[in-house]
Image: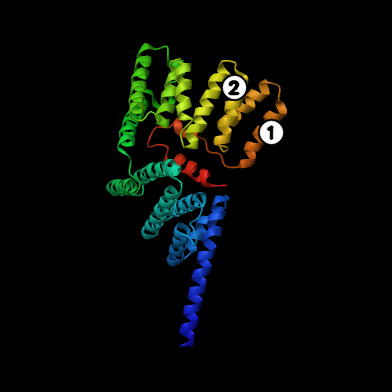
């Protein structure tokens, strides 16, 4: 009897101890600790369930949304590794927990819906393009994940219509222009300009459904630059800069900075490059642009400090990279963006 009692007491103690360690593991993950995912996977299933319940329900209140979001990405990492190792049941458990944690995030902070939408877009693509999974199975799994996302985070009718029009415009843009995009060097070709205006009208139709659609405004502004319509581009980038997603705000400010830089408005260019960096400090493009601008203005010491600060960060992820990649081919970079955004 004593042995059984001691065993039960020891099991309860170790489970409570493991649950107590869960916040430390999440904190370690958000602090770039490469061992955090392994430590999470070493916990028992019951301990993880208890810890997630405590984080989402809380006593007296749930965790802050930023920590819940970090925990959601930590479980996403565990899902990714478990799938790679063929541990299907473990992967499924972590995926459900990630969804649960991200659901708690959007309940506490609805503006984080943009983060969840990107998570919902990225994971099905990772599943569908996994060469280790049979195509039919991969497609079914990806569809199931997509459907679960839509059930947990349904789209409004307006958003759904705007998103459908945006997806069609994006598909046509990549079909016509490929990885180089509709660059300014190609705008002298009348056929290319006609195609660019056709795609621009598709983004305008998305904005007609939702005038504040930040991604459509960003893409439309980029096309306006290629068409030489910089004043119209600036209007679209203003719309994009009001979006909740820091990636979109970063790109809007970066593109505005480039317009001012090209036109010799160096004070404005500097201001917008700094605004871009403030939105996404891990992205090198704006830092390089600002450093080059500062060097041209004779501020070499400040230029050098900007580059050294970037190097000290270690991990670099730039939304400009995913912006220039076609849909379906940028999932790994999108996952990197999600990772970097939850880390401290």
Up-down relation of residue 148 to residue 198 (above or below): below
Q: Which residue is tagged 2?
A: 268
Q: Residues within 10 Å of mark 1 (few under 14, many from 20)?
A: few
Up-down relation of residue 5 to residue 61 (above or below): below
Q: Residues within 10 Å of mark 2 (few under 14, many from 20)?
A: some
The N terminus is located in which quarter?
bottom left
Instruction: Judge left or right: residue 180 versus residue 284.
Output: left
Instruction: Judge left or right: residue 111 versus residue 258.
Output: left
- Image quarter of residue 160: top left
In percent of width and height, residue 122 lies at 40, 42
In percent of width and height, residue 125 lies at 37, 42
Q: Residue furthest bottom?
A: 1
Up-down relation of residue 334 to residue 4 (above or below): above
Q: Which mark is residue 278?
A: none
- Image quarter of residue 224: top left
Viewer-nearest residue: 15 or 63: 63
Q: CA distance from mark 2 to mark 1?
A: 20 Å
For label 1, the SS is helix
Counting every numbered tag in the picture gives 2
Q: Earlier in the sequence, mark 2 or mark 1?
A: 2
Viewer-nearest residue: 102 or 84: 102
In percent of width and height, residue 53 lies at 44, 61
Q: Which residue is tagged 1?
A: 305
In percent of width and height, residue 65 lies at 49, 50
Residue at (48, 74) in percent of width and height: 12
Instruction: Judge left or right: residue 176 versus residue 42.
Output: left
């Amino acid at each position: 009897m004593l042995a059984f009692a001691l065993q039960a007491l020891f099991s309860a103690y170790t489970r409570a101890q493991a649950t107590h360690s869960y916040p430390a593991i999440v904190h370690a993950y958000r602090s770039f600790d490469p061992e955090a995912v392994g430590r999470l996977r070493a916990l028992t299933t019951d301990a993880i369930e208890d810890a997630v319940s405590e984080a989402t329900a809380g006593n007296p209140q749930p965790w802050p949304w930023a920590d819940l979001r970090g925990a959601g990405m930590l479980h996403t990492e565990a899902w990714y590794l478990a799938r790679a190792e063929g541990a299907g049941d473990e992967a499924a458990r972590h995926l459900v927990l990630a969804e649960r944690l991200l659901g708690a995030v959007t309940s506490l902070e609805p503006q984080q819906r943009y983060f969840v939408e990107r998570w919902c877009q990225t994971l099905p693509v990772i599943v569908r393009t996994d060469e280790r999974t049979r195509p039919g199975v991969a497609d079914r799994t990806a569809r199931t994940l997509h459907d679960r996302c839509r059930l947990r985070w349904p789209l409004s009718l307006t958003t759904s219509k705007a998103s459908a029009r945006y997806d069609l415009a994006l598909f046509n843009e990549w079909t016509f222009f490929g990885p180089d995009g509709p660059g300014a060097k190609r705008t002298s070709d009348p056929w290319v300009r006609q195609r660019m205006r056709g795609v621009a009208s598709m983004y305008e139709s998305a904005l007609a459904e939702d005038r504040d659609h930040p991604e459509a405004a960003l893409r439309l502004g980029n096309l306006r630059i290629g068409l030489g319509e910089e004043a119209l581009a600036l209007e679209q980038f203003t719309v994009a800069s009001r979006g909740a997603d820091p990636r979109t705000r970063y790109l809007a400010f970066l593109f505005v900075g480039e317009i001012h830089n090209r036109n010799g408005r160096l004070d404005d260019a500097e201001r917008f490059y700094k605004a871009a960096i403030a939105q996404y400090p891990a992205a090198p493009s704006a830092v390089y642009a600002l450093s080059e601008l500062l060097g041209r203005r004779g501020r070499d010491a400040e230029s050098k400090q900007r580059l050294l600060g970037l190097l000290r960060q270690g991990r670099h992820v730039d939304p400009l990279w995913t912006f220039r990649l076609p849909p379906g081919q940028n999932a790994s970079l999108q996952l990197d963006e999600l990772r970097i955004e939850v880390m401290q």
